[in-house]
Amino acid sequence: MRIAWIGKKSPFCGNVTYSREITNALLDRGHQVSFLHFAQEESDLENSPNCQEVTLPFIYKSQVYTIPTFKATKVLTQSLRRIKPDIVHASLTLSPLDFVLPEICDRLKLPLVATFHTPFAGKGAKLVSGTQLLAYQLYAPFLGNYDRVIVFSQIQRELLARMSVPEQNIAVIPNGVDVEKYSPGSSNVKEEFQAERLFVYQGRIAPEKNVEALLRAWKQAEMGPDSKLLIVGDGPLKPSLEPFYGLEYNVIWLGFVADEQRRIEILQGADVFILPSLVEGLSLSLLEAMACGAGCIATDVGADGEVLEKGAGVVLNTKTVRSQLRTLLPLFQDHPELTTLLGQKARKRVIEQYTLSGNITRLEELYTKVLEQRRRVPLSWGA
């Protein structure tokens, strides 16, 4: 199958990881993939005759949104006309191009699938104000113009349906992780940081990630000197938090870690992985930690609480994150058998429902179904 994939390659974020993992996995299965992206860096994709890249010009891009140039629409249209894909898949980048894609693909008679990543607060669908709420309000009227919209959980599907996106257009395909690559294994990280018990946060240091609640809980819990908290990631709040929560509290700031094998090594050495977010979609970092056998604690936002059901981890209430962590951190410090059991259950849960292989199989089935429906009933955009 010839697939035109539209997404981002940088800066590092969940969308970038999703695009890299899915496109490489599709290539592994013998599909031809053209990756159209807002970047000029060297390819992170496998060297393959079945893959070509097209760079789309942009004015600005961040982990949250992208602003293309006026020329980007023309470059995209000409590229799709030249590539002649069987199907177009857009990993939505919070870009104005997302809204004109259905019209472009309709003109070119190309089936169009989208993945909608935007985080949300969780059950009850009370979105926090700001970027997330605005994104849902902006996108809901347009998502029905795609042949299918992929979301990560049933909760998100219900949310979009309540915002008038046609239910038959919404497909639930959770994120998946490569459980061969992300797996329990030996790691020297504890020795490196002189820790008997290792706690890890990995993600952006931004308001919606609620990292300060974790740091305050860690400080108030008065953890022992042999317990270390690694903060892996970068973001706008790092400069204001790092000076107040440093080595004197056994907090170690690693910054952004680009090397994937290094990130895996950290997760393999972790006793506990903590994700205190106020909003999420379905965190790939959480799935990776679970696959590596870490005991996991996460808030009940997005689909993260759903992932940790049935004893696969500890689910926190967003309203009382700090007080809950203040109680849980010493418990997990003093009872290694508890985190070992949680880690085993976490990996089992991922293997059962959140593998990359299973994700790709479901995606291939969706592509086939969309193509068959297009052949039977050629729909026109906006009809």
Image (cartoon, rainbow, N blue to C red):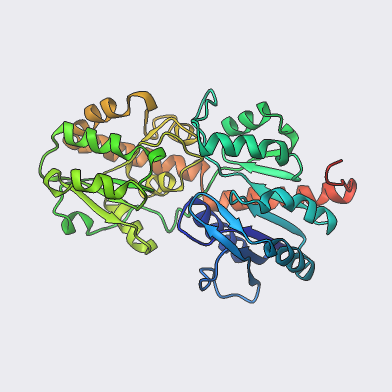
Q: Position of residue 22 (x, y in %)?
A: 57, 57
| Apparent side of residue 244 relative to residue 91 in the rendered image (left or right) | left
Expressed as whole percent of the image width and height from the top left, the position of residue 268 reads 31, 53
On the image, the x and y values in percent for residue 125 come to 55, 26
- Above or below, comparing residue 141 to residue 195 in the picture: above
Residue placed at 38% from the left, 39% from the top?
A: 207
Q: Residue at x 41, y 38 (%)?
A: 208
Quarter of the image where the N terminus is located:
bottom right
* Closest to the observer, 126 or 294: 126
Q: Which residue sits at x=19%, y=43%?
A: 244
Confirm whether residue 332 shows in the render: no
Nearest the viewer among 237 and 10 is: 237
Task: Tell me what residue is drawn at x 47 percent, y 38 percent.
Answer: 280
The quarter in which the C terminus is drawn is top right
Image spot of residue 267 (x, y percent): 32, 52
Residue 218 shows in the view: yes
Q: Where 29 falls versus 159 (above or below)?
A: below
Callout count: 0
> Toward which corner of the image does residue 72 lie, by quadrant?
bottom right
Q: Is residue 347 left or right of residue 148?
A: left
Q: In terms of image quadrants, where is residue 58?
A: bottom right
